[in-house]
Amino acid sequence: MPLRHLLAIEGMHPHDIGQLLDLAESYVLLNRSGKTQRDLLRGRTLINLFFEDSTRTRTSFELAGKRLGADVINMSVATSSVNKGETLLDTAATLNAMHCDLLVVRHAQSGAPDLLAQKVEAAVINAGDGTHEHPTQALLDALTIRRRKGRLAGLTVAICGDIAHSRVARSNIHLLTAMGSRVRVVGPPTLMPAEIEAFGVERHHDMDAGLDGADIVMMLRLQRERMGDGGLVPSAREFFRFWGLDAARLARARPDALVMHPGPMNRGVEIDSAVADDPLRSVIREQVEMGVAVRMAVLDTLSRGGANG
Ligand code: ASP
Ligand code: CP
């Protein structure tokens, strides 16, 4: 079945994930050569519809679309008629009437991209919905790991910090477990979803034990925008003391362990600068590079399988 939309990693077949990663690999090489492939999406329109802030995802979808020849529109939600009370569905219907082919959506509400996918003809790509999923982030993380380690199967990946509010954690858990990695989730009980073991992961409430022998250490930002005033975390300084990654903590992981972070980072809260900027251990910049290639692969794939493909 051709891929019609990209809404979630959950439910994706490992073969399809592998194919997307292989295609993205070819786009890494194309991007590094400085060439483009502007005939692929010539005449197609991609609209970035971001109801939440973004630096990496929005910019890389724009670059990816342009490198493949699409007309790319960045809709500024802050200055749109959403402010005059227009609903998400009416906004989408308006864009649909302009014959948009690819709609990239970020929204604070989990499930918003699924809803849109039922209402518009465009291929819909989830660029992050609430605490639900961020599928292209998990794909770019997997590509980064696979290129560095040569595989995903059998690796131990520690995902650390605010698991409860992180769509990055959720998409990575689905992808990595599907591809045969061993996933540990590490963080305080207040930031850990109940029954997380049902996702096939190991839960750790002690950072040192969670990092012990890990191949990959993936740090997450505290998603304060989703926490309300519940007092789920102590002060930033105290959080760092128990759950932050510094060189001493990283020494618990394998000597060749890689440090990852989806960005944006809050230095001194979940990660120390010395670790984040260590060229021997940190692949955080490389993740951003892989993001462009992965998004090109996703646009390529959807343009073949989508309604207008
Ligand atoms: N940028 C990622 C997201 O939008 C992670 C984060 O914001 O912490 O989910
Ligand atoms: N990782 C990520 O999604 O970054 P942005 O929020 O900047 O897009």
Image (spheres, rainbow, N blue to C red):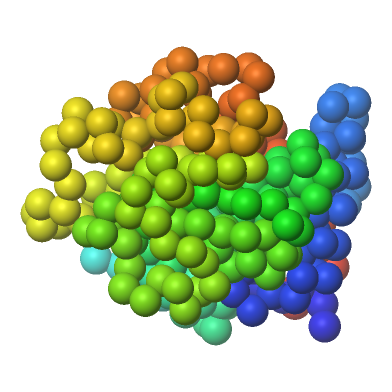
Q: Against 57, is 30 above or below?
A: above
Image position of 39 (left or right of 18): right
Residue 19 is drawn in which quadrant? bottom right
Relative to the observer, which residue lies in front, 113 or 131? Answer: 131
Q: Residue at x 71, y 43 (%)?
A: 145
Relative to the observer, which residue lies in front, 146 or 45? Answer: 146
Q: Against 125, is 243 above or below?
A: above
Q: Kindly tell me whether residue 238 is visible in this rendering.
A: yes
Image location of residue 245, percent across then percent down = 41, 31
Q: Kindly tell me whether residue 93 is visible in this rendering.
A: no
Q: Residue at x 50, y 34 (%)?
A: 252
Image location of residue 170, percent across then percent down = 49, 63
Q: Against 27, is 188 above or below?
A: below
Q: Considering the image in quadrants, where does the C terminus appear?
A: bottom right
Q: Residue at x 50, y 57 (%)?
A: 184
Image position of 152 (left or right of 74): right
Q: Residue at x 77, y 36 (%)?
A: 148
Relative to the observer, which residue lies in front, 5 or 130? Answer: 130
Image position of 293 (left or right of 185): right
Image position of 285 (left or right of 309): left
Image location of residue 141, percent across then percent down = 64, 47
Q: Considering the image in quadrants, where does the N terminus appear?
A: bottom right
